[in-house]
Each structure stands twice: as C-alpha cells, then as structure tokens.
Image (spheres, helix red, strand yellow):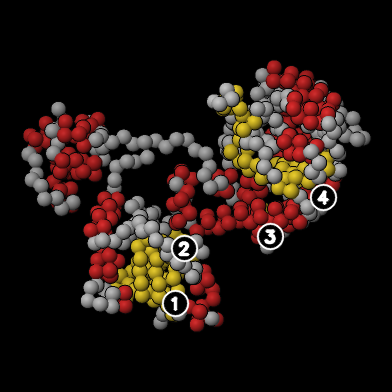
Amino acid sequence: MNTVLSEQEIQRRDALAKLEALGINPYPAEAFDINATAKDILTNYERDKLNYKNVSIAGRMMGRRVMGNASFIELQDASGRVQAYLKRDDLCPGEDKTLYNTVFKKLLDIGDYIGIKGFVFTTNSGEISIHVNELTLLAKSLKPLPVVKSADGKTFDAVTDPEFRYRQRYVDLVVNPQVRETFVKVSKIKTAIRDFLNERGALEVDTPVLQSIPGGAAARPFVTHHNALDIPLYLRIANELYLKRLIVGGYEWVYEFSRNFRNEGMDRTHNPEFTVLEFYVAYKDYLWMMEITEQLFEQVAIATNGTATLTVGDKEISFTAPYPRVSIYDAIKEHTGFDVNGMDEVGLRDVCTQLGIPTDASMGKGKLIDEIFGEKCEHHYIQPTFIIDYPVEMSPLTKKHRSKAGLVERFELMINGKELANAYTELNDPIDQRARFEEQLKLMERGDDEAMFIDYDFLRALEYGMPPTSGIGIGIDRLAMLITNQQSIQDVLFFPQMRPEKVIKQASNADYRAQGIPDGWIPVLQKMGLTTIEALQSANPNKVFNDLGGLRKKMKLEIPMPTKDEVLKWFE
C-alpha cells in the first residue's frame, strides 16, 4: 500500500479545497432523488419519449469531452452508461458561469459522483442523451480510476491484473462492467435455488458459525477463543450436524446457505471462506436426492442463463437431466486399471505407490481411496455425473448400503472435473454413529488433522430418534464458477482471501527536516520516489541535484534552487 500521494491525487485534493472555497460541499448529506436509470433511458426512450421530459439520474462521471461552451460526459450508474450533454448557458442561465467554467471544467474529475437533471433527446449522430439543466456534485473522487478505453461496445486495455482486481474489488467493479454482471448472476443462482426449495415447502434456517465441535465434514478448522465463556471455539467447517438436529426436532425439510471456513490450501477452486448450500429432507434417501439434484441444477442453469447448456472454457456442458451414475470402485478401475474393491490399507498404499500418489502414515483406508479417485479419476468427469456407493471408511455420517456390504449410500456430483455436491442417505442409527466417530478419533490420534471430532450432543440428539433422512451439500462458489464461465473461485467471490498488502514506508516531514531539507523540497523528493531517508541516502547525489531542477520547472515551484553543496549536506 503506497501512502505517497501521486501528482493526480495532489491535484484532486487541491480541487477539493477549491470546491470548498467556493462554498460547494463535495460530500453533501442531502438525498438526491432519482427517477431514471441509464438502462431504462436507453431501452425505453424511443417508444415512450413523453416520459423522459424531466429525468433525474446519478452516477459516476466516466468520460468527458469539453468543446468550449458545450460538453459531453459519460455517466455510469448501476445499470450501465448513458451520454449527457452540457451547454454552458443552459447549465448557468444567469451571469455567473462558475458552475460550468470552473466547477465542471476544472474542478470535477473522472470518477466523481454527480447528479444531473434534464430531458432526454437524440443527438444528430443518433445517440440517446440527456440534456443537462442541473448538475450537483455528490461525492468527490480523490483517487484516479484506471483508464479503460472502449469503442463500438468493445473494451480495450481492460484492467486484468488479478492482484489489483481482487484486492481492490471496488475499483474492479467500476471499470469492468462484465465483473458486475458476473456477480448479478451469482445472486440469480442463489435466488433460483431458494425459489426451487421454497416452492417445495423447504424452510430456510440459520445455524451457528461459532461451534464447540467442528463437525459435519473432514477438514482442518480455524480455532478461536470466547473470552466471556473462556472456551475454545471453531469456525464451522459445515452445518450438517445442526441441520440434522432440526430434523430430529420435527422439521421435515430444512436448508441453509452456510458460510463455511476451512484452514486449508488455496488455489483456483479453493478459498478458506466459502458458501455451501445444505438441505435435509425426512423420509427420503440418496436415490431420491439424485433426482431432485438433477432437477435443481437444470432449473438453476435455465434461470440464470436462459439455457441448460453452458459454455465452460472450450467445453459445452449440459445440465439437462438425467445424469449418469458410476460407482467409485468402477470409476477407479476404469481410469487406473486397479480393482480396489475389498483391498485393505496395505494394498491401497501399494496401489498409491504404483500410481505415483504420495501418502503418509496418517492416511487410513478411506483417505487413500479418496486420494486415488481425486488424482486419477475426478478430472475425467466433465458432463454431470453421479459417483455413487462409497466405502464406509470414507463416509462417517452415511448410512450403510442396503444391499452392498462395506459400502454406504452416498454420491458426489462431478461436473467439469470437480465435485459440486456431496449427498447421503443419512446415518440415523446412534450406536453405529458412535462407532464411526470412534474410528475417526483413532485417525486423529494417528495425526490426521482432518479427522472428525466426536460430537456427543449430536449423538444424544440421534438417541431421541431421527427419521430416515437424505441430505446434500452443494458448493455454491464452484457452481457459480460453472454457470458464469469463470476459471477461478476468486472471480465469483467479491473479496477473496489474500496475503496482507505490503505497506510502502514513507518518512515524515520531520524526518526530512532533520536532514536539513526545506519543506518546499520534500514533495519533490517524494515525487522522485525518495520516500524514506534510507532511499535518499542510497541515491546518487549528483543525479538528485540535477533532477531537482527539472522537477522544479515541471511542478512550477516558486522556490529558490538549492546549491549543490546544500544538496550534498542532505546525504550526510
């Protein structure tokens, strides 16, 4: 983070001071009433011109062409951009032309928020525009926006640097309209899911983010401390066990958009903070859940993009039901040649060695199978495919298969080579569940930091009786990546996690004065990039002296030039 002001930032602050000197509040508190948007005007004006004789609109000034006593600007609001026309004598009908000649032409900048009132018309070139009669400054922008050029609906020199875009998302949203559209679609996805579930009688609920037991998934949690209770707490890794408690309590279909936290790696499909939809339905099983999942995904795709067939990178993916169903053992056999069905831990570890998959002593049978599938099989499933019937060791919360020994009734939905959903016929036998938790405890003792904790209160809830239930978790961020055709999870998160920004140090004016530098030359040295005394002392004194003269002229400074001997003393 650079705390040194650029030349443009200095100029904008100077304009701010001049506006205030004119009695103009650059950040007024009064509401500005709006009765039109850019999109509304451009879409509806031609067929309903009488309704646009008196419009009031606000937004950022994103472009300006001054042509003497008349000017054009580009105004951008949340819906898009519209052109506005300003004529000096219309904007300033009296003798005082300050608003146009000084305020608009000299003291307003690209990025400033303004409100305008006037009427809509069509220019001689056929462009729908607003003829401005009133202009109000609503917020002064003190930092310049990146320059993005566009013509004929195409954008040139777009801001693409991910470090800048993700860290300063607020600027990314201003200068890259397609980014705003991506997040509009993300919102539509969630709305479509809510509509689907609500229409079928599901109840949206909230469960705790701070949990005493990080249950419901195999993941490493974030740990915190509650001062008042003096106990450790965990940010939730999943909300599954709380939603099942609600099924015990008598609700038959509950769902939650859950913000989850996992203290694990980051890549283009993983962020430590992410959103999952989980829902649980009484008296259903995983076969029913596959059918409802197909219907949900198809409806969400259509509601968001108008079609069930999506373009993802260079691939076309169809969300149209039904989806193929492949057992995890069959998938491994097909893509590795190994039949791991019935293998013990030693045999699985040997398979991993032959396949070049690294392992460690903490990995049990379930994790070894998961590694084989993840490394050698997952990426093959581009079209939606249910991977079903997992080994019991991989699924501590899942009911044992009704007809296949050693397996559980579970599926994962794979799309574009990644898991999008994970679902079970839920384990509701409290005795079996306790035994599964105890197996997880043994893995934790072996060093598996993703093994599940034992949640004794959840076991107590099961002992009161939970009806046959099916549940699912859907990765909303990954689903959003697919439907919006984004290659990175960071592109569907407003504010993805990033490393702390480096702060560029700057010496204080007192530090410069201690070196014998007059106040008038301090901003000149800062302009040269000599923002610390260490940077100054490592610079070439002769070059600094020569550059001072050039910058004195460029910055139009009316201060005497120091002698070379005086400059050399600054380096002592």
Q: Tell me, for residue 303, which label it has, or none.
A: 3
Residue with the mark numbered 4: 291
Mark before the other along the chain sequence, 1 or 4: 1
| Residue bearing the label numbered 1 | 54
The span from disc 2 to disc 1 (Cα, nearest Å) is 18 Å
Give the residue drawn at x 47%, y 48%.
169
Above or below, 289 against 63 in this view is: above
Give the residue type at disc 1: Asn
Look at the numbered disc 3 and give the secondary structure of its residue: helix
Determine the secondary structure under disc 1: loop
Tell me how far mark 1 sits from mark 3, CA to CA.
Answer: 35 Å
Which mark is first along the chain, 2 or 3? 2
> Which residue reaches farthest top?
445
Kindly identify the amino acid type of the residue bearing the numbered disc 2.
Answer: Asp
Quick check: marks 2 and 1 in contact, CB under 8 Å? no
> Viewer-nearest of labels 4 and 2?
2
Looking at the rendering, which quadrant does residue 72 occupy? bottom left
The local secondary structure at tag 2 comes to strand
Mark with earlier residue (3, 4): 4
Picture coordinates of residue 188, whole percent (x, y): 63, 56
Foreground disc of the pair 2, 1 = 1
Write the residue at 27% across / 68% down.
99
| SS at badge 4 | helix
Q: CA distance from mark 3 to mark 2?
A: 25 Å
Tell me which amino acid carries mark 4.
Glu
In front: label 1 or label 4: 1
Dot 2 or dot 1, earlier in sequence: 1
Mark 2 = which residue?
77
Specify few, some or many for label 3: CA neighbours under 10 Å numbering under 14, 14-19, or 20 or more. some
